[in-house]
Amino acid sequence: MGSLLGEFLRARRHLTTVDQVGLTRAGDRRRTPGLRREEIAMLAGLSTDYYARLEQGRDNNPSAQVLASLAQAFRLSPDATEHLYTLAQPRAGFHAATAPVDRLDLRVLRFLERWDDASAFVVNRRLDILAKNRVATGLLSEFEHTDNLIRLTFLSPIAREFWLDWEQEAAANVAHLRAVAGADHDDPSLRKLVDELSRGSEDFRRLWARHDVRGRTRGLVRLHHGRVGEITLWNETFRIDSVPGLRVFVGEPEPGPSSDAMARLCALSCGGR
């Protein structure tokens, strides 16, 4: 686990600027915009040698106080702070004890179909798409494969045309995958997915190396569907408590042209419903 913690700390240090943490630039001629080890150590109240051992994976048991100091020094978000603690203090047997079988109750499937004017689909920790309603099926109809949200984001040729803000969407999906994966990188299916995406997409390798951590919750997403044109959706994410790790992504069209476009798409793809 030390190497995962070290990777995360190095990535955060390289991406954190002196301006973000309130350090002075006077006479500073650094080669890269990131922070130096001694600067993070100073901000966290640690010795440079001890912080270096953390980055290098030579200390596998930082205290809660050290982790809190590092989270404050890096100005980490709540999601990233939780991720930091998970990497440093993983729960023994987490994957084996809690990984559920991805089975959906029929009542959940009926629940999806009740959203007859919004896109709704269920994903697991790896962002595999386990079920989707008729609207989501129509929305994704131009993709050849729709088995995994992050796979179609990076490996589908039409992805950059479909998501008008592709870079933003891609970064959000990678950060979400980091957030839900936590320290559980021994999951063979997750490791296989990351390896596949790393081989097939330079953009995925670049974003995965950033170690950004951010769960998907809500926000606007702009799409372009080849049959009906541009659609702006307001996305919300809900947990399915009966099966830990599963989430429902719901996209409701904004009133006006987006709602009209979604209605046309549904008429074309959903049998007029």
Image (cartoon, helix red, strand yellow):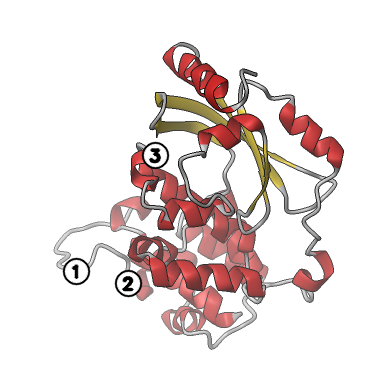
Which corner quadrant holds the C terminus? top right
The alpha-carbon separation of the residues under discs 3 and 1 comes to: 40 Å
Query: Seen in the image, is 23 located left or right of residue 128?
Result: left
Nearer the N terminus, badge 2 or badge 3? 2
Residue sitting at x 80%, y 32%:
110
- Report if the CB atoms under discs 3 and 1 are less than 8 Å apart: no
- Foreground disc of the pair 3, 1: 3
User: Which residue has dot 2 on it?
Assistant: 36
Vertical arrangement, residue 126 with respect to residue 108, above or below = below
182, 189: nearer the viewer: 189
Q: Which of 258 and 16 is in front in this view?
A: 258
Crowd class of label 3 (few under 14; some 14 to 19; many from 20; radius 10 Å): many
**Identity of the amino acid at label 3?**
Phe
Position of residue 114 relative to residue 218, above or below, is: above
- SS for callout 2: loop
> How many circles with numbers are drawn on the protein?
3
Instruction: For the residues labelled 2 and 3, say whether their Cβ atoms are less than 8 Å apart.
Output: no
Q: Distance between the residues labelled 2 and 3?
A: 40 Å
Looking at this view, is 203 or 176 the one in front? 203
The residue where tag 1 is placed is: 30
Residue at left offset 81%, top offset 64% = 98
Image location of residue 48, percent across then percent down: 42, 79
Q: Counting residues from the N terminus, which is met first, the one under dot 2 or under dot 1?
A: 1
Give the residue type at disc 1. Answer: Arg
